[in-house]
Image (spheres, rainbow, N blue to C red):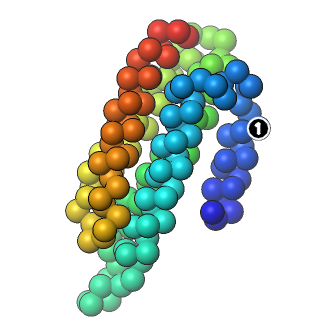
Amino acid sequence: MCNFDVIAKKNMLSNTPSHLYDSPIYKKAMDIFALSQNISVYLNQDLSSLKEDGSEDTNIYFSGDIVQQSVSLAPEIVNAELERYSDRKHKHIASLKRLTNMLYKNSYRLERANSNGKDFLPILRSELRKFKKLQRSWMLSL
């Protein structure tokens, strides 16, 4: 785990109210973060080398994107839970939806990558579909 990931995870945990640790949506967000991180590491091993013409594989950026987007899921949940005002709460919910949709799109972009790691992307999308279902019920509880 790189320094950014350690700091991000520590920040997620330090701001999280204790009741959220047992929340299904929070747990799923953390699962998606871990899965995205592992997929990115796996893909980066294949995508980090230069092509024969000396250029880099542009898909490597999408592998970083899925980590950046997934690391933001749990904090948006926490922020929505802690927010008192309805309009601000809805901004965090909207941000969570955008992040989820971007993760989904980037998983499809990564499938074009020349890597065996792309075999794990359908698993990520399956987890994202479960997350979306949890989002709908969670939003009703806010």
The amino acid sitting under disc 1 is Ser
Query: Which residue is rendered at x = 74% and y = 25% of the image?
Result: 18
| Quadrant position of the N terminus in the picture | bottom right
Query: Which residue is rendered at x = 73% and y = 25% of the image?
Result: 17
In the image, residue 69 sits, relative to residue 91, either above or below, namely below
Quadrant of the image occupied by residue 118: bottom left
Query: Which residue is rendered at x = 68% and y = 62% of the image?
Result: 3
Q: Could one spot residue 68 in this view of the protein?
A: no
Instruction: State the image coordinates of residue 135 (x, y, percent, origin top left).
Output: 44, 22
Query: Which residue is rendered at x = 53% and y = 9% of the image?
Result: 141
Instruction: State the image coordinates of residue 92 (x, y, percent, origin top left).
Output: 53, 25
In the image, residue 105 sits, relative to residue 18, either above or below, namely below
Q: Could one spot residue 38 in this view of the protein?
A: yes
Q: Which residue is mark 1?
A: 14
Instruction: State the image coordinates of residue 140 (x, y, percent, origin top left).
Output: 47, 9
- In-image side of 141 versus 44 (left or right): right
Mark 1 crowdedness (10 Å alpha carbons): few <14, some 14-19, many ≥20: few
How many discs appear?
A: 1
| Quadrant position of the C terminus in the picture | top right
- In-image side of 101 versus 24 (left or right): left
Quadrant of the image occupied by residue 80: top right
- In-image side of 109 versus 40 (left or right): left
